[in-house]
Image: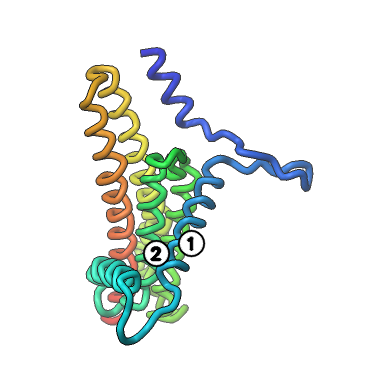
Amino acid sequence: MEEFVEELMEELDVQTAFTLPILGGIEIKESIVGCWAVMGVLILIAIILGSNLKVNNISKRQAFAEMIVTKCNEIVGGMLGEEAKKYTPFMASIMVFIGAMNIAGMFGIKPPTKDLNVTIALAFVSIVTVQVAGIRAKGVGGWIKSFFSPVWIVFPINVMEIGIKPLSLCLRLFGNILGAFIIMKMVELLIPIVVPVVFSLYFDIFDGFLQAYVFTFLSSMYIKEAVEMAEE
């Protein structure tokens, strides 16, 4: 049990990958390096799949790229609805990015989403997008007025939602990724042979993408709600 607790604390501890020798030394955490690595790989894949595109007689590579984009747009577009479909490319990119970070552990990189700071940043980006969508749909005056809807007395609650929504998003993502690690360690202690491999595949692949989907789904619902309220 002591060994388990030590491993858990080590997992929660965000190590410094290196220090930039400027401004007295700027520490770059391993989660940041992990994010950069994932972004680099995704950008490289996008460049490879997106080069030399054609209208006719497309290659298998282009067909594969178009299939991925179409599927992502279908999934996210269905969440956002017709009124908020302009945010589909952005939210689809977020879903792929989070999914890639969640499965980074399979390639020897500590998943950046195990760092609470990373999930907070993702939640912040999500909620800013929600507020921007609301302002673009309602205008600044309509956006401010929405905080007093349906009656002025709910104003404090509506303001609190701005903080509650991203908090729930970041804690849900962080908690599920960390929870998967805890379950895996418990399985390894109880059944150290064969079974952990099966569970590892589940948590590293299926659960990793599932959490990316859930994060994107909730963010998309918030955007859809902000836009649809402006149409009423």
Residue at point 34% right, 69% down?
61
- Residue that sits furthest to the top in the current view: 2
Gap in Å between the C-alphas at discs 2 and 1?
Answer: 14 Å
Quarter placement of the C terminus: bottom left
Disc 1, SS: helix
Mark earlier in primary sequence (2, 1): 1
The answer to whether one can see residue 96 in this image is yes
Residue 129, image x and y in percent? 43, 67
Residue corresponding to mark 1 = 44
Secondary structure category for the residue under label 2: helix
Viewer-closest of 225 and 119: 119
Image quadrant in which the N terminus is located: top left
What amino acid type should be assigned to the residue bearing mark 1? Answer: Leu
Q: Which residue is mark 2?
A: 93
* Relative height, residue 54 to residue 202 (above, below): below
Q: Which mark is residue 2?
A: none
Count of labels in the image: 2
Q: Nearer the viewer, residue 167 or 18?
A: 18
Q: Is residue 226 above or below residue 179?
A: below
Q: At which x and y percent is residue 190?
A: 24, 17
26 on left or right of 39? right
User: Does residue 149 show up?
Assistant: no
Q: Residues within 10 Å of mark 2 (few under 14, many from 20)?
A: some
For the residue marked with disc 2, what is the amino acid? Ser
Give the answer, above or below, for where 129 lies relative to 185.
below
